[in-house]
Amino acid sequence: MKIIENPNRSFWSDILERPSFPISTLDSIVKEIFEDVSKNGDEALKRYTKRFDNVDLRTFDVTKEELKNAQNDVSNELKDAIKLAERNIKIFHRSQRIEKTVITTSEGVQCWQESRAIEKVGIYIPGGSAPLFSTVLMLGIPAKLAGCKEIILCTPPNKNGDIHPAILFTANLIGVRKVFKLGGIQAIAAYTYGTESIPKVHKIFGPGNQFVTAAKQFSLAKGIAIDMPAGPSELLVLADNSANPSFVASDLLSQAEHGSDSQVICVSRSSDFLKEVSNEITSQMEFLPRKDLAKKAIQNSKLIYLEEEKDILDLINEYAPEHLIIAVENEDHYLENIINAGSVFIGNYSPESAGDYASGTNHTLPTNGFAKAYNGVNLDAFVKKITFQKISKKGIENIGRAIEVMADAEGLYAHKNAITLRLKSIN
Amino acid sequence: MKIIENPNRSFWSDILERPSFPISTLDSIVKEIFEDVSKNGDEALKRYTKRFDNVDLRTFDVTKEELKNAQNDVSNELKDAIKLAERNIKIFHRSQRIEKTVITTSEGVQCWQESRAIEKVGIYIPGGSAPLFSTVLMLGIPAKLAGCKEIILCTPPNKNGDIHPAILFTANLIGVRKVFKLGGIQAIAAYTYGTESIPKVHKIFGPGNQFVTAAKQFSLAKGIAIDMPAGPSELLVLADNSANPSFVASDLLSQAEHGSDSQVICVSRSSDFLKEVSNEITSQMEFLPRKDLAKKAIQNSKLIYLEEEKDILDLINEYAPEHLIIAVENEDHYLENIINAGSVFIGNYSPESAGDYASGTNHTLPTNGFAKAYNGVNLDAFVKKITFQKISKKGIENIGRAIEVMADAEGLYAHKNAITLRLKSIN
């Protein structure tokens, strides 16, 4: 891997450019499937499941027997691991609850916020080779903690019409009972309109390929909320000579193996360190089963040498990485000044994969620079905060005149009159 | 106004249907202007300002002289009213700050969230007859409290190239210094791409007509965050005989005067009360300068008699009103069970116009049923919560094995290896 030395700021946007992520060409197929599902409901869902997943399903429900079998098909070791992760994710997300605090803004004017769970949420878990039961934890646990009444999970069946037992085990463990064998654009369309089998939801969560991503955008335009816009996964590691080049290489590779469009960046004030990381990547990569994917991602990736701390901070904030590892001696300086990142991992023993699975933080995070405006999924993603206000006679006497004057200046006389009538009734 | 008595649930969706709000036909004009602004920058902005606002501008900046004149052109009474509102909005939004809390999920595994302000935010204030300086308060104050570095305000100029002095006074009062004379689709396009004069932003806030709404949706699809999807304003009042029909009528009318597409609904267990409200609406409406708008909105509106408390709650939650006034004796029952609403006003002396201006709560709220998944603007809308984690050797010993097992089961061997290397280095 080539090391980029002290790049001029005018080149930063080129260096930091994300791998392209085309999406708009899918609009017509997404629209077609949405219209079909909206009109024909379950019948359309079955047709698409046959076409895309190569399986004829009578119903989308997971049976009790399938759930029971799943318990037997997951090893005890994996069960224990999932339970440890569940525990930590629960502890961290439960800590995000906020207490109701009543604020008196003027005498007699009380205002507060209260969280109320989104009633119906839809979780999407992709299919494919890797069964993403970890994402079931990351989305299902906060949905349960928030108190969402209806939590639906859709995930595509394999050719035999089955769902991976680890996904079923995990959903059952955390109390997500409505699991459907349904994937792709048709699953997101079902969440958007509802069908005979699949309930319409108010918000859709979860990762997916470019089809699912395009479908979620379409759903958003139709008025359904989504967790966040999606893009390929990415990691930026900031390290100095106090870091371990072998650890850093393993972290870069663990991001790179996600897909050929993943991106990893390592920034350091030591070019010797970067050379060691480069060598470590080459040697570790050989032993990876997914080394073909990782090799392609590594081609998109950058080792950047920068002298000045100020430049390093600006570069990180400009890139706004989904994952940021900070393995330097003066970590506090960076922690205080990081503005844009999804999740930050501090020190030599905080690998990104800890946050992917079991430390307790969420792994559904903003990619593609969206960390400039969005945060990752947390408990707040499953609630809405309603504002309440209770004003007494004394309160309206205190603020009523100001409201009259402002409403009058905005030309809204009925707004003014709603105050005038009340003030008159008091005096 | 006709009273709808105990409607069957199968009719609810018809009764509660929002006035139609067409938007998709604007896509081509929005796309054209966005492309033009993206290519031609300020030159395009000036062309559209001439075409749509009928004014030839040399620069979009508000001059110091204009700011100074604005101070003189606002009455002292209005200045004082705006300052009182500013104070209350500041108190309430400041109270929404959260403390950083470090959580130990497993021994040696520390996780926490920290809020970081979105660096660049764009506020849009509509032009037209009413100068919405109150919205400058509602969006500018939390942006300042959050610590957003760059707060831009765009608002269209009138035919003389001026901005209403109350808008300039308010922006200056709260410390929003970058005010530009720019409106419509072209302002949102400028926020999306940036031009020579107007900085690109990460998130766009503010109300607008159907053109601005369509432009914000387009911007969202281009990766810029927006406050929330928009729709016409609406109010639902729940009242019993303990309420004052004259007050209730004044509240319904203050919502109705916003525009002919506004919607107001009053629900009660007393049909006599609803009759009184209807009579009050008829008599109060005559005295409103905007009675033509209000009359049209009242035509969309509904007085609904329902006997059962359970039905009332279900109907409110199904409608998910932007504004909800609860003026009944047993208010607690409803307050506890409301799930979907933007902002709730409790009792006879809490008119909706209090929250529009000066109680302290925000008036940028979810309409069109979006309260099922979104909340109104609050301090959180201007920050992102970054998660941090710091894991010690002890910590990775505690959770490392679980991560290895899970990564292995998901087929992500580099993820596993990042743990294995660290565990080996410790033992």
Image: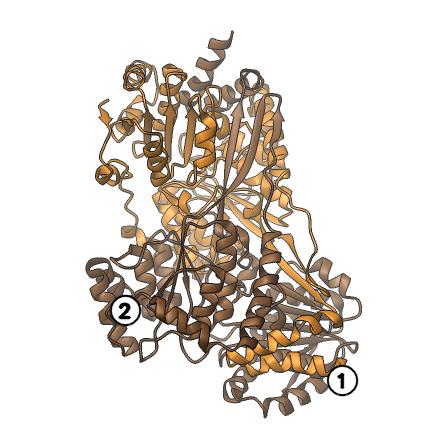
Chain colours: A orange, B brown
- The x, y position of residue B82, in whole percent, is 55, 69
- Numbered disc 2: secondary structure: helix
Which percent across, then down, holds residue B209? 41, 72
Please report the residue visible at 31 percent of the width from the left and 76 percent of the height from the top. Answer: B161
Q: Quadrant of residue A292?
A: top left
| Residue A390 tag number | none
Q: Give left or right: position of A190 versus B152.
A: right
Q: Residues within 10 Å of mark 1 (few under 14, many from 20)?
A: few
> Mark 1 or mark 2, which has the lower sequence index?
2
Percent x, y for residue B260? Answer: 49, 81
* Number of the front mark, 1 or 2: 2
Residue type at tag 2: Ile
Residue at the spot 47% in from the left edge and 9% down from the top edge: B424
Q: Nearer the viewer, residue A73 or A121?
A: A121
Q: Amino acid at mark 1?
A: Asp
Q: Is residue B69 visible?
A: yes
Q: Going by the image, does B280 lie left or right of B31? A: right
Q: In which quarter of the view is residue A218 placed?
A: bottom left
Against B4, is A163 above or below?
Answer: above
Foreground residue, A423 or B386? A423
Per the image, the residue denoted by label 2 is B29
Q: Give the residue at x 69% y 71%.
A: A398
Q: Are marks 1 and 2 on the same chain?
A: yes
Q: Write down the residue under mark 1.
A: B272
